[in-house]
Image (tube, grey):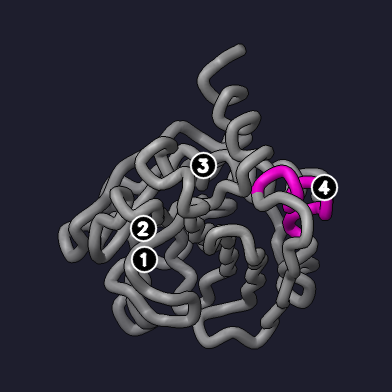
Amino acid sequence: MGRTSRLVAATAAAGLVAGCTGTEPGEAVPGSPTPSSSAGAGSPDNGAPKVERPLNVQPLLAAPCDTLTESQVETFLGSGASAKAAPEGITGPECSWTTDHQHARIYLTFPDLDDAGLTSLYRNRQKGEFFEEMPPAAGYPVVAYGITDNRGEGECTVRVGVSDRDTVDITLYLSDDKVGQLDPCEAAHEVATAVIGNIKARN
């Protein structure tokens, strides 16, 4: 069994999830500038990778919780997780999946602060404590980032480029009993891979 498969198996039983940037969903971060600062929107620069096969996320903006199936949520969080959609979220359509199991939770956002895709994050990479490129998720570029580095607290946020204009943010919090045992960014990457797989299936 590979490292990724072992991670999924470990989190399925315990209720994983990982986390973030030190901000709650709906809170603007330096990696997400306002439209006035997004010169060159739609054309990657500042080292951001180009997305060769853009995905259409428009059908999911009104139903962001459809990005994960019920069985996938149970795999990541355990049974009894609840979903709450906010299509009119402050920073874009979002969904939160929460559980009573030791604070494990997942937040997903389709950021709409600009249309520069991953370029915004690359342009502002020096403004946060944490910026790390990760392997692609189902073929799409991924960056783990944060204003502060909270991985030691079981938190990580990853941003996936689904086109040169659009991204998906996934913020994860590990369950208390997994903090220090699992890498929250690897866990976040697992969720991102599932999300992108579901988006691809709709395209």
Query: Are circles 1 and 2 on residues that touch, CB within 8 Å?
Result: yes
Could you tell me how far apart the alpha carbons at marks 4 and 1 are, in whole angstroms? 40 Å
Relative vertical location of residue 52 with respect to residue 145 in this rendering, above or below? above
Taking 107 as reference, is 41 left or right? left
Q: Residue at x 37, y 74 (%)?
A: 23
Mark closest to the chain's N terminus, 3 or 1: 1
Along the line of sight, the residue nearer the viewer: 28 or 161: 28
User: Residue 187: which numbered mark, if any?
Assistant: 3
Q: Residue at x 54, y 51 (%)?
A: 17
Write the start and end of the magenta stretch as one range: 67-76
Q: Local crowd at mark 2 within 10 Å, few (<14), some, or many (≥20)?
A: many
Relative vertical location of residue 17 with respect to residue 61 in this rendering, above or below? above
**Which quarter of the figure has residue 93?**
bottom right
Quadrant containing the N terminus is top right
Q: Residue at x 42, y 44 (%)?
A: 185
Residue at disc 3, secondary structure: helix
Check disc 1 and report the residue beneath it.
40
Relative vertical location of residue 198 with respect to residue 24 in this rendering, above or below? above
**Which quarter of the figure has residue 33?**
bottom left
Check disc 4 and report the residue beneath it.
71
User: Residue 119: which numbered mark, if any?
Assistant: 2
Q: Position of residue 78 (x, y in %)?
A: 71, 50
Q: Local crowd at mark 4 within 10 Å, few (<14), some, or many (≥20)?
A: few
Q: Nearer the viewer, mark 2 or mark 3?
A: 3
Residue, far top = 1
Could you tell me how far apart the alpha carbons at marks 1 and 2 are, in whole angstroms? 9 Å
